Amino acid sequence: QVQLVESGGGTAQAGGSLRLSCAASGRTFTMGWFRQAPGKEREFVAAISRGNYITNYADSVKGRFTISRDNVKNTVYLQMNSLKPEDTAIYYCAARTSVTAATMPSLGSYNYWGQGTQVTVSS
């Protein structure tokens, strides 16, 4: 059993920055961030593999968000710059605890999820 604890959410103005963190209680493989805005489905934001730090980003955040991880601390980060009001959502950390052929954006391929942290961007 792996627990994921997110932190770093909050409120920012458009153009501002926030940094999210997610600490895992055990070893994980690929870790990712997803988000869910009111009335919308949960969507992929970014993910990073464990061994070779391969990253994948949603088109909507490319060039603005950066995902990174510290395997010693079992922690993944999401640096969010140039925030837009449409980035407002609950952000969820997700982790895989086994190797899979599924693509990184595949929501169903992650078997552990955090409780979510609110990010609000004002215009």
Image (tube, rainbow, N blue to C red):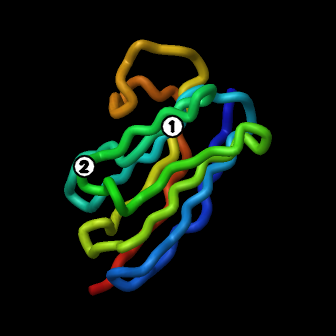
Q: Residues within 10 Å of mark 2 (few under 14, many from 20)?
A: few
Residue at 45% across, 65% down: 80
Residue at 34% across, 28% down: 106
Quarter holding the N terminus? top right
**In the depicted view, which residue is nearer to us: 48 or 5?**
48
Q: Is residue 54 above or below residue 119?
A: above
**In the depicted view, which residue is nearer to us: 54 or 121?**
54
Q: Is residue 112 visible?
A: no
Residue 65: image x %, image y %?
41, 59
Q: Is residue 103 left or right of residue 100?
A: left
Q: Which residue is mark 2?
A: 59
| Amino acid type, callout 1 | Ile
Specify the quadrant of the image occupied by residue 8. bottom right
Residue 56: image x %, image y %?
39, 39
**In the depicted view, which residue is nearer to us: 105 or 7?**
105
Q: Which mark is residue 68?
A: none
Q: Secondary structure at mark 1?
A: strand
Q: Is residue 82 above or below residue 91?
A: below
| Amino acid type, callout 2 | Asp
Residue at 48% across, 40% down: 32
Q: Is residue 73 left or right of residue 75?
A: right
How many labels, in total? 2
Q: Which residue is mark 1?
A: 48
Query: Counting residues from the N terminus, which is met first, the one under dot 1 or under dot 2?
Result: 1
